[in-house]
Amino acid sequence: MKIIVLILFVLIGQLQYRLWFGDGSINEIAQYQSRLDELKIQVEEKKHRNDRLYAEVLDLRKGQEAIEERARDELGMIRAGETFIQVIE
């Protein structure tokens, strides 16, 4: 009977060791979960960025107004017959 009890204690000890310190331990799972949460946040940010870029591409494909607006803002271009007035504050 003592041998059976000893074997059970050794077996329980081994299982407890694996639970707390071995592969797939509680600490390791918590680290993986936190890393997964960080990656999910990054994926969501990239999805939002891609959605904005896709909307901008559709806008540029759709009409000249978006192209004209970007040329005015980024390159300082004006149409023929327009007068450019710059206000310095």
Image (cartoon, rainbow, N blue to C red):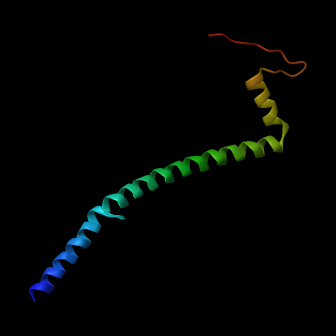
Left or right of 3: which side holds 52?
A: right
* Residue toward you, 72 or 45: 45
Place of residue 68 in the rendered image (x, y in percent of width and height, measured from the top left): 81, 31
In the rendered view of the protein, which quadrant contains the N terminus?
Answer: bottom left
Residue 37 to residue 13: above or below: above
Q: Residue at 69% of width from left, 43% of height from top?
A: 53
Which quarter of the figure has residue 62?
top right
Give the residue at the far top of this rendering: 88
* Residue toward you, 18 or 72: 18
Residue 51 to residue 10: above or below: above
* Residue toward you, 76 or 44: 44
Place of residue 39 in the rendered image (x, y in percent of width and height, measured from the top left): 50, 52
Place of residue 42 in the rendered image (x, y in percent of width and height, measured from the top left): 52, 48
Q: Residue at 77% of width from left, 46% of height from top?
A: 58
Which quarter of the figure has residue 13?
bottom left
In the rendered view of the protein, which quadrant contains the C terminus?
Answer: top right
Left or right of 50: which side holds 62?
A: right
Give the residue at the far front of this rendering: 3
Q: Residue at 46% of width from left, 50% of height from top?
A: 38
Give the residue at the far left of this rendering: 2
Residue 23 to residue 87: above or below: below
Residue 15 to residue 39: above or below: below
Place of residue 2 in the rendered image (x, y in percent of width and height, measured from the top left): 9, 85
Give the residue at the far bottom of this rendering: 1
